């Protein structure tokens, strides 16, 4: 009994130590964002700023049109979330519930695309969008989300859908429900944890995406927050207090989303591996 208690104490100690190490960069970011310029380069560093300066956030917000960048990012992220949830859940529903020739081979081929580096398809994809004359528009960032939603998202949802009893499908079909109705009225309502996990992953991916906007967006009025933050770094990189304040503005929605949906996120990850 004593050995079990000691091992649990040691485990908690290691977890707490690891959590502290991981959060140090974030704590330093918050501390620097609240410092005056004179406190930023003090040696040894002062972790708790005195006095605290909230003016850095106002200065960072007005230094560049961050409101415009946030609006563009929210639009792109929202449209991608809708497309990814709709298309990925439909494809995953097909793999989880239907039997057809070549299903296994097609699924393995889908998983194989996860091992394909993005750099391999970057140039051909750019040429396709250029031929459509859609460079400097949001279409290259949004449309791919409606074309399947990504291999990882499909795999995650398929695993969760397979854990839902098929008896529910049969009962719904007896009541006259179509395949589309089963997906919409039974599968999706029972898959809230998995869908929440997809929402979190998709939101983080599209909100923080840098390479796509960098390649396809050329006008400042279409920049997303990631590109705006890079532009801010080029102009105000020496002013670390303003740079860290701008970085916090960028990551704040991600932090809020994770803490709000944390319970469903963990449940979705755990339950998606019940049935292979």
Image (tube, grey):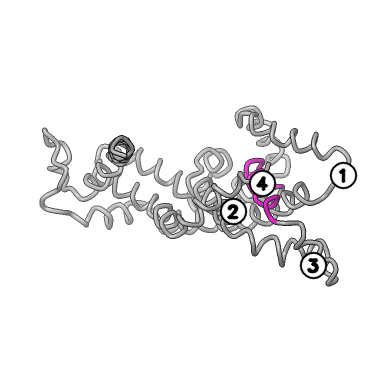
Q: Secondary structure at mark 2?
A: helix
Q: Which residue is mark 4?
A: 159
Q: Secondary structure at mark 3?
A: helix
Measuring 66% from the left and 46% from the top, which residue is drawn there? 159
* Label placed on residue 100: 1
**Image quarter hosting the N terminus:** top left
Which numbered mark, 1 or 3, is in the foreground of this view? 3
Relative image position of residue 129 (x, y in whole percent): 69, 41
In this picture, is 105 found above or below 64? Answer: above
Tell me which numbered mark, 1 or 2, is placed earlier along the sequence: 1
43 or 191, which lies in front? 191
Crowding near pointer 3: few (<14 within 10 Å), some, many (20+)?
A: some
Magenta region, residue range? 148-164
How many numbered dots are placed on residues in this image?
4
Cα separation, mark 1 vs mark 3, equals 21 Å
Relative image position of residue 235 (x, y in whole percent): 33, 41
Crowding near pointer 4: few (<14 within 10 Å), some, many (20+)?
A: many
Cα separation, mark 3 vs mark 2, equals 22 Å
């Amino acid at each position: 009994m004593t050995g079990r208690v000691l091992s649990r104490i040691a485990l908690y100690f290691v977890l707490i130590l690891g959590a502290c190490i991981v959060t140090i960069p974030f704590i330093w970011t918050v501390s620097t964002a609240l410092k005056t310029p004179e406190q930023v380069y003090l040696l040894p560093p002062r972790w708790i700023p005195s006095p605290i300066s909230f003016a850095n956030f106002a200065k960072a917000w007005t230094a560049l049109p961050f409101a415009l960048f946030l609006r563009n990012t929210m639009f792109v992220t929202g449209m991608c979330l809708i497309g990814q949830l709709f298309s990925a859940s439909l494809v995953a529903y097909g793999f989880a519930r239907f039997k057809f020739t070549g299903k296994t081979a097609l699924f393995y081929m889908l998983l194989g695309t996860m091992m394909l580096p993005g750099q391999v398809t970057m140039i051909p994809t750019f040429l396709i969008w250029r031929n459509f004359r859609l460079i400097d528009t949001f279409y290259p960032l949004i449309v791919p989300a409606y074309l399947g939603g990504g291999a990882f998202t499909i795999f995650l949802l398929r695993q969760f859908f397979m854990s839902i009893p098929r008896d529910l499908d049969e009962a719904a079909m007896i009541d006259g429900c179509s395949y589309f109705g089963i997906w919409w009225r039974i599968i999706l309502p029972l898959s809230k944890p998995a869908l929440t996990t997809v929402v979190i992953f998709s939101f983080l991916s599209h909100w923080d995406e840098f390479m796509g906007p960098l390649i396809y967006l050329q006008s400042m009025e279409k920049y997303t927050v990631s590109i705006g933050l890079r532009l801010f770094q080029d102009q105000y990189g020496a002013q670390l207090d303003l740079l860290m304040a701008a970085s916090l503005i960028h990551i704040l929605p991600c932090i809020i989303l994770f803490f709000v949906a944390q319970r469903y996120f963990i449940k979705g990850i755990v339950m998606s591996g019940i049935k292979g």
